[in-house]
Image: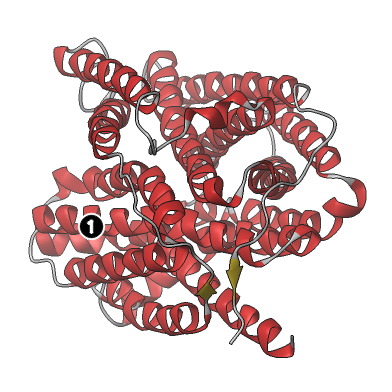
Amino acid sequence: MIQQTTNRKIVTIGLLAALFIGALDATVVSTAMPHITKELSGFSLISWVFSIYTLTMCVATPIFGKLADLYGRRSVFTAGLLIFAIGSILCGAATSMTALIWFRAIQGLGAGALTPVTFTIVGDLYPGEQRAKVQGIFASVWSVAGLLGPLVGGTFVDYISWRWIFYMNVPVFVIAFILVVGFLHEKFEKKAKNIDFIGAIVFTIGLTALLYALLNGGEKYAWDSALIIGLLCIAAVFISLFLFVETRVKEPMMPLELFKTREIRVIYLLSFLGFAITAGVMVYAPQWIQVVLGHSATNSGFTLMPMCIAWPFAATMTGRLMFKYGPRLFIISGAFIVAAGSLWLMLIDPDSPYSYLVGILIVIGFGMGLLTTPILVLIQNAVDWSKRGVATSTNSLMNALGQTVGVAMFGTLFNNAAAGLETKQVAHGMHVVFISIFIISIAVVLVVGLLPSQRKESGKPQSSVAG
């Protein structure tokens, strides 16, 4: 028993290392981009360095989640590690912006395996109350990475080379590989598998078209341009075809029966709406500080720090207390706190002091921390072990889609409302965005009311770290 507990802790450390470095890579690049574009001469392609990572990660997430259910967590986790490590090495060695974009796409594929499979393994290893505590710690990793990313990136750029923001991933992933693969032993039933190749293909086409349209609509191309309209039509056709295919195959990539459970439908919607709010706040709050209040770029960047501290604090606290007081209490509390912070955000004006926005971000970050941990635990408790991987990865997809749709929607609203570049015009555009964020927060409160009052845990862990 002591050996099993020790091995489980070792596996957990390895999972934390892999998740952290993957999360860090999503933020650390931003600080280094001016140096990268200067050396590789590709400023016009800068947005693609970020967009391609998001796109491939979103596409890969549910696919790898299903593969983890079919072939076991360890093998898919290992594949994700290797893909991400290869992508990191290639990014560090890139000699042009075009090459860097393609290599970032490979990184995104690896991240699409690592994030959902990591949370799935934690769900397998820890039962009940222990699962909530550990998931609370893991849920805070993204906030900590968001806090440290710009600092780490700046340090490497100033004192070593921007290439090492990618090369540094390799030793961390070697450690994660040794700890997880060496100490995670699955009791996995080997049998013939039916892979949903058609579903995976049509899903990839549909989601790629949708994400490309959302990431470029209103900025690079007008929303009413032929390209964006065509992409949205392609997305509608192929996503509809995907839903049709999933009702016909023996082992669907994304079992539609997941959405038959009201609890899971509500939770996925909460994830989508919550991360749309987060995207809007993280993009426009620093801009308000810099453009409207006239503070430096450094101060505007540090504005997000209180949010990145309050979020993991609340997530960890929730993980420790939710089985004592019930997950629904924390979800409801989180929804109302996010709404309160969004209301405060909507009420600020150009004469509001800097400290107001700091307080707003603390409130919203704390509320999101209360939401994320119980949402993840409820999803994993609501399904059997054989569907835990795809259920968890679908939630990760909802998070990413919420952020992507949120950024696209808020960007369109801002561009339409801000008639010029004067401070008053920019402030008006951002105020329209803040009103929209508040409206979405009200929707979150209303959706929380649809949650069932009782929760039943299903599915037993089928992974062991003994031996």
Q: Residue at x 55, y 63 (%)?
A: 121
Extreme residue in the front direction: 191
Image quadrant assignment for residue 275: top right
Say whether residue 205 is left or right of residue 239. Answer: left
Question: In the image, what residue type sits under mark 1?
Answer: Ile
Give the farthest residue toward the right.
Answer: 325
401 or 223: nearer the eye? 401
Q: How is the image coloured?
A: secondary structure
Please report the residue visible at 63 percent of the width from the left and 78 percent of the height from the top.
Answer: 8
- Residue 463: x and y in percent read 58, 68
Q: Nearer the viewer, residue 91 or 122?
A: 122
Left or right for 34, reference 421: left
Q: Is residue 23 left or right of residue 85?
A: right
Pointer 1 local density, CA inside 10 Å: few below 14, some 14–19, many at least 20: many
Quarter placement of the C terminus? bottom right
Q: Is 219 on the left or on the right of 315, as rendered?
A: left
* Residue in the foreground of this view, choosing between 392 and 332: 392
For the N terminus, which image quadrant?
Answer: bottom right
Read off the residue under disc 1. 106
Q: Position of residue 104 (x, y in %)?
A: 24, 56
Q: Provide residue 154's location: percent of width, then percent of height.
A: 38, 69
Front in this rendered view, residue 95 or 230 = 230
Above or below residue 416? Residue 185 is below
- SS at mark 1? helix
